[in-house]
Amino acid sequence: MFDSVRKHQRLMQFLLLVLIFPAFAFFGIQGYEKFFADDDTVASVGSSRISRQEYELAHRRQIEQLRQMLGERFDSSMLDNDAARARILDGLIAQRVLLAEAIDKRIAVSDEQLRRAIGAIPGLVGSDGKFDIDRYRQLLRSQGKSEQMFESEMRSDLALQALPEAISQTAFVPASLVDRMIALGEQTREVRELLFRTADYASKVNPGDEQLLAWYERNARAFEVPENARVEYLVLSGDAVARQIEVPEADARAYYEQNKARYGTPEERRASHILVKVEAGASEEQKNAARTRAEELLAKLKAGADFATLAKAESQDPGSAASGGDLGLFTRDTMVKPFADAAFALKEGETSGVVESEFGFHIIRLTQVKPAAQRDFESVRASIEGEIRAQKAAARFADAAETFSNLVYEQADSLTPAAQRFGLQVQSADEVTRSGNPKLPREHPLNNPRLLAALFSADSIATRRNTEAVDVGGNTLVSARVVEHRPARREPFETVKAQVRERVVNEEAHKLAVQAGEARLKALRAGEAPAGLSASRTVTRAPSEAMPAAAIDAVFGAPAEPLPAFVGADLGERGYAIYQLTRVNLPDAAQVAQRRDTYRQQLQQVYAQQALGDYLESVKARSKVVSHPERLARAEGR
């Protein structure tokens, strides 16, 4: 029942934050003053205006937040539509309304609350757990703010957030409601099924040409081929620039010598140990007792005791005792210094004396020495040359980008000159539309909105000239040109007649299946003896291939009594189904107890979100809100 809340809980919380407080990373109370003087407003709350600049900053901030949240799945078109722009504006209005309400209610933030909030900012607490005042001041300098300004803005932000937090915390869910929701959500039902499949009625449908043509005309849009083009394109990337860079052997050898340590492996050793542990803060008496015990064990080894057997029996290192004290291979810097000094002073097969470290007293036996190794120049030459090319390419890319941009503009009839200049290959693609080509990966240049806008501009289509060099991100420039343009058109009836016939037959067969199913359902409810139903099976509220959502809705929408009961469900293209409900199974007391906390939390979230939404609407209703959504597109330069 709460699958949607459960699946999208983090997204819902994210939306509450970005829609209600989208600009507070940029503005505090003082920051708003500079916007009020801007006559080009997109909304106002009383005498407080929301400026075009404020909207643009909020829009950019949401783009960056979604980019970080979604990564490669991010698509800028998610916020490039009227609905998204309206949501951002609504969020700014809600923010401004809450700000006025916070001032009116005289909500104050104590010094202790402010200290806790500042202390929670990532990076301001050192490794010793203490607040780092130098880091704090450095943060303020990077934002160009004084301590007084920053802390004043923090107080304002905290005061603003206090209202919705307080409203959310008022949500109360009665225990009886929780148990009732569990009873509904966790119950199962036993059903028998009778299917009326669409495919079984297809042979009874024989449409004529007039019927097919009429259907074709009614559904003309289904046979429209969108405007598309065959295009050529050229990609200049950092890798392409790097490939043109020659790396002299002398440079590569010098790099190798300067970074020789990177191409070697240090000496490794393998040892076993017996540990007599000393706890931190132990007294001298306890330390002496541990040392004495270690010396006793060392004496046993000298007398001929087997090291592995003694380690299993006496070592207090839980990580290695079971394996006879074996620690595996390690380098010097992976062990604490006293242990490493002792282990690396031994010869293979030797046993140390008693070695003291911060963990206690060790007896170490060296079992293997793996000498240090150095990879020669030739074995790493290709890698070194690649690194040098990448470093030089980063420095040269700006110049290459300028040359590339000039070439595709000055010799706009062809991409070949630019391709030859940079050793690139002109690539081609077909069926590219104004929204890209779904057959290509999302990150492909021909799915980039900026490049597509340039490619399908009126001038580009008319002249077949190169587009400007478009930056598609990741140190990559792309220019493209239309080779063949095809306007939007509709497939002729004769070409798609077979498809039309298939769709008409399916539609009519589905209607017959539904008619037959509804007639049978009526008869069963009137007392006809059930026949042809499947064996009984138990179903839950979770849709599946066998029980799609329409079937679940019908089965769980039926009254729990009297039983048996009959319900029907239109399964779309699959046909129609009749379900005989034979039993309702309620969760037992153990199930209710196990699920009670989960359901209570989910219900509280729903109640809190509803309460916050109602509160915002009531406050907005009391405020004089004027919105200008028609100005939003212009605010983004569209």
Image: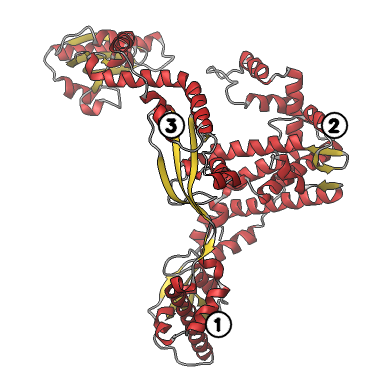
Discs 1, 2 touching: Cβ within 8 Å: no
- State the mark number for residue 417: 3
Name the residue beneath numbered marker 1. Answer: 562
Mark sitting earlier along the chain (1/2):
2
Q: Is residue 102 left or right of residue 382?
A: right
Q: Is 528 situated left or right of 278 in this image?
A: right
In the rendered structure, find residue 204 and report the number of the disc placed on it. none
Which residue is tagged 2?
Answer: 37
Quote the CA–CA distance across marks 3 and 1: 82 Å
- Seen from the viewer's position, the closer of residues 395 and 509 is 395
Disc with the residue nearer the chain's start (3 vs 1) = 3
> Which marked residue is nearer to the observer: mark 1 or mark 2?
2
Image point (40%, 79%), residue name = 199
Q: Which amino acid type is marked by label 3?
A: Pro
Give whichever of 366, 12 is nearer the camera. Answer: 12
At which x and y percent is residue 583? 48, 76
